[in-house]
Image: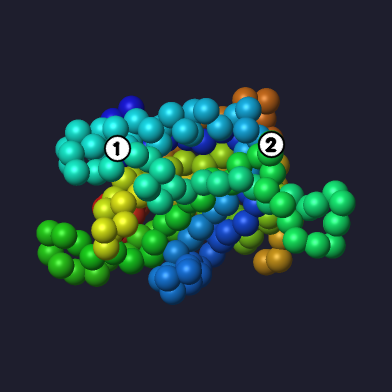
Amino acid sequence: MALYDEETSPIGTYAFGNIVGAPEPDLGDKLAWQAGLKLENSKIAPLLEVIDQAINEYRLQFPSFPNDTSKLQLPFGPAMDRNPDDPDGEKIQSETETIFKFKRKLEYTSKKTGKVMQRSAPTIYDASGKVVNDQIQNIGWGSIGRVYYKALPYTYLKKPGITLALEGFQIKELKAGGGSSSGPVAPIEGGGWEAPPSNAIDMTDTSGNFFELDE
């Protein structure tokens, strides 16, 4: 991989977030789309490898970036499970699953022009690789799929870390809920949920689908 290349996560469970519709405030009160993907620990090696490679390549460009990854803000951690001894109590850290957090901020400031720009929403695909943003009102938590993302190291306010920039989500199993690249992607092996035919959206128009490194 090369730094800032788009990557594909293993298939996991969409545990939380908002990847369809309008962006929502994040913890810093900035509008964003977010996704928490829960993966079995046996499947996380490819994602960790991408993160490690991005950090190493970034460090070649910026030697002051910490060598000790324990000093970095990392976009993953243990999933939280119900305590079998106290199901109604506080959840405990899972020993078998990990949550990876992906984010796509709505706005960014262009370093070339100084203007505030806006990104389009994450691209949503069905299992065949068809873009279905015009046919999906919501993706319920518990849906199964994979994330298209970019691993972006950063240094912000002397707090170095790496973020996983959300580019798109491909649905394998769609769970009903309450309510980038924009070209074709590979079908999910074994198939899965596919949208009905629709010609209501022209995804060849990518204007506004900007990308720039977040701070």
Label 1, secondary structure: give it: loop
Q: Measuring 41% from the left and 40% from the top, which residue is drawn there?
A: 183
Circle number at residue 137: none
Q: Which quadrant of the structure image shows residue 16?
A: bottom right
Q: Which residue is mark 1?
A: 67
- Image quadrant holding the C terminus, namely bottom left
Who's the residue at 23% across and 65% down the image?
109
Any part of residue 171 in sight: no
Residue type, numbered disc 1: Asn
In this view, the residue in front, 154 or 199, is 154
Q: Which residue occupies the extreme bottom position in the image?
A: 29
What is the residue that sits farthest to the left in this orientation?
Answer: 112
Image location of residue 32, percent across then percent down = 44, 64
Quadrant position of residue 191:
top right
Where is residue 157? Give x, y as percent: 27, 63
Viewer-side residue, 56 vs 128: 56
**Amino acid beneath label 2:** Thr
Q: Check the picture and name the quadrant holding the N terminus.
A: top left
| Label 1 CA crowd tier, 10 Å (few <14, some 14–19, many 20+) | few
Q: What residue does disc 2 label?
A: 96
Reply above or below: 71 against 11.
below
Classed neighbour count for the residue bearing mark 2: other residues with Cα under 10 Å, few (<14), some (14–19), many (≥20): few
Nearer to me, 82 or 37: 82
For the image shown, how many numbered marks are present on the structure?
A: 2
Give how far across and how far down residue 107 sits, in percent: 33, 66
